[in-house]
Image (cartoon, rainbow, N blue to C red):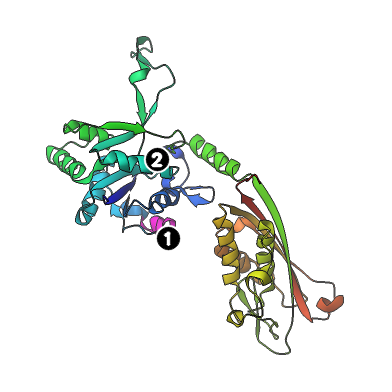
Amino acid sequence: MSRVAAVVVAGGRGLRAGGDVPKQYRCIGGMAVIRRTLMAFTAHPGIADVQPVIHPDDEARFESAAAGLPVLAPAHGGTTRQASVHAGLEALAARAPEIVLVHDAARPFASPALLDRAIAAGRGGAAIPGLVVSDTVKVVDASGLIVETLDRSRLRTVQTPQAFRFDALLAAHRKAAAAGRDDFTDDAALAEWTGLPVAIFEGEATNVKLTTPDDFRRAEAELLADLGDVRVGSGYDVHAFAETGDHVWLGGVKIPHDRSVEGHSDADVALHALVDAILGALAEGDIGVHFPPSDPQWKGASSDRFLAYAVERVKARGGRIAHVDLTLVAEAPRLGKYRDAIRARVAEIIGLSVDRVGLKATTSEKMGFIGRREGLVAYATATVRLPWTTP
């Protein structure tokens, strides 16, 4: 089987897309564009190596966006797209792949089927994905008058990933660099310049390149439309105070107090309630089903593990958590000065922005067991979006 590598070009600045960061690092559907793009390639079983090419100023952004993904150390791009691709190819040279796919980081929706077609077509030497032109195309002069109507049956709009025999594309880039040519807008044009025949294979209308603010708005709307099953789950947890201790855990934050809380794990009522809310939205039982208190392995366990597990259950079903809300009820400890820290920690565990984590703290006005300072309570809700499925 041919060894296949991919070069994902992410060195541009993306000014037309607006915003205060390059477009490949903007989020759609709660995830950076470049991460979605890289995931499409790292998840494909036929691709052995994924070589990102980034702007030197974007090291920190890239590290955050690509965290945990099995990609090669990024190469630094040049002043043109052509130079950036060349840098990526040179970085791959020691690995000697037989086929290379060159893809724009700003195209995050390439499907596995498209990558299959690209790999198959690349074995022929050089091939690019294209779409049939459905609109009539006119050529106009400088004054805007039509001078020619083109035969659209011979026209294609082209996309990436463009696929090549690796050695042929690297040789073409080296030849262009030696000749001082840096004006090729894609690798197919460079290959054509060297005399390499380039074929067209079927592209995908959904494989759009995000360029303008409207592109981002449409992409976000389409992603949300795909997650049309909106669920709301609720959770509740209560724990009694121990006779002694010096802290309690709430929302993943260690809070000083003159008594600890009784419980099999760290007894974090806030995170336990959140876990139940998320599992409830998924209709997958409660925290005790997944982490039985009778199991000794959970004794003293940090509750952030339970919440991270619930989050992964959502991701496993192709969904996302849109919002969570917590209400903590206790006479003590006072939680006002810890509010921001709790929200930040919950957001970090779930992978949300802090503005999607609500938190209120109140008392029971000295009534009941809470009023007697015998324990504390947490209520939680979670809004989860899942792909709509038909039974």
Name the side, left or right, on which 23 lies relative to 236: left
Q: Which mark is residue 108?
A: none
Q: Residues within 10 Å of mark 1 (few under 14, many from 20)?
A: few
Residue type at mark 2? Answer: Leu
Q: Is residue 317 left or right of residue 195?
A: right
Instruction: From this view, report whether residue 210 is shown above or below residue 386.
Output: above
* Residue 29 percent coordinates (x, y): 54, 48
Tell me where residue 64 appears, x and y as whole percent.
43, 59
Which sits in the foreground, 2 or 205?
Answer: 2
- Residue occupying the point 39% across, 17% down: 137
Residue 264 image-quadrant placement: bottom right
**Residue 342, picture quadrant:** bottom right
Number of numbered labels in the structure image: 2
Counting from the top left corner in percent of width and height, residue 44 is at: 39, 51
**Where does the magenta region start and end?**
59-69
In the picture of the structure, the residue carrying the numbered disc 2 is 114
**With respect to residue 372, does 176 lie above or below?**
above
* Dot 2: element: helix
Residue at 55% in and 39% down: 222
